[in-house]
Image: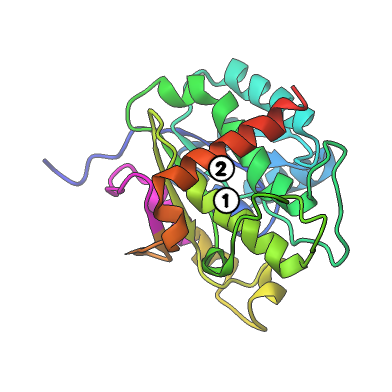
Amino acid sequence: MSSAVSPAPRTVLVTGATSGIGWETARLLAGRGDTVILHAPDQASGDDAVSRLVAAGADTLRLGLVVADFSRLDEVRAMAARVAEEHPVLDVLVNNAAVVAPERRTVTADGNELSFQVNFLAAYLLTHELSGPLSARPGSRVINVSSSMHRTASISWSDPQRAKRYSRIAAYAQSQLALTIFAREQAPWTSVSVHPGVCDTALLPLYAHEGDSASQGAERVVRLCDPVAELVPGAYYDCTALSPAAPVAMEDRTVRRLCKLADGLVARTA
């Protein structure tokens, strides 16, 4: 078949799309002609992100905006309901939203350690709440933007909220390990996780003093969104290369255990 045939436009939701890799991912996908739904934590940052995309050449008619504070799981549910109502078919979900764990342990109104909720539980809940749109058309994908720091992490099963021993690095790494494990949950769509590289974003201080540009990181994420790219379900990608995840993330029993934990934590706010 000729490679000159353009792929059909798709609908993609990118979380944490107001800056950094998320915004650049939205920009690149919009440039491909996809309908891109941007998630923002608040209306002002979302409006600004959309304005900057339009200024960069994006088609206003192919941009959408949804707002939810991921430190509040009720807002995640409400956002998912709106997306499902307005977009009954969702081809790609990019779970990119992330925060640096604060120096002092911070607990959300839902009772969860902040980075564990924003970086993992919100993505877990959102993905499950969008199962209808994600299952509506064959070939849909969920891309979890994770981190190489998952290799240094462990899930504190007896204390996932890190109440007894808190370290911002350990808390952040745990959230990234959870996101990486979550990509291996059995689903009707293809899920993978990706470390987009050490990039010059708000998360950079956790890794190094300098890094690749956010647009370079976004290119690695967008490559996995491309229907032409063949993905290994549940796999972990380091930049552009298929790479072994941490051994604990490859255990089926760990996947089941994590999903059971997450189900219990999100059920408390249902």
Residue 254 vs 265, above or below: the answer is below
In the picture, which quadrant includes the C terminus?
Answer: top right
Mark 2 is on which residue type?
Answer: Leu
Secondary-structure class at tag 2: helix
Left or right of 34: which side holds 82? right
Q: Secondary structure at mark 1?
A: helix
Residue at x 50%, y 63% (from the top left corner): 196
Which quadrant holds the N terminus?
Answer: top left
Horizontal placement of 2 versus 168: left or right? left
Is residue 204 rendered to the left or right of residue 127?
Answer: right
Say whether residue 92 is magenta: no
**The magenta segment:** 219-236
Mark 1 or mark 2, earlier in chain: 1
Amino acid type assigned to the residue bearing label 1 in the image: Ala
Local packing at callout 1 (Cα closer than 10 Å; few below 14, some 14-19, many 20+) is: many
* Residue 25, horizontal then vertical, whole percent: 54, 52
Q: Which residue is mark 2?
A: 258
Q: Are marks 1 and 2 in contact (CB under 8 Å)?
A: yes
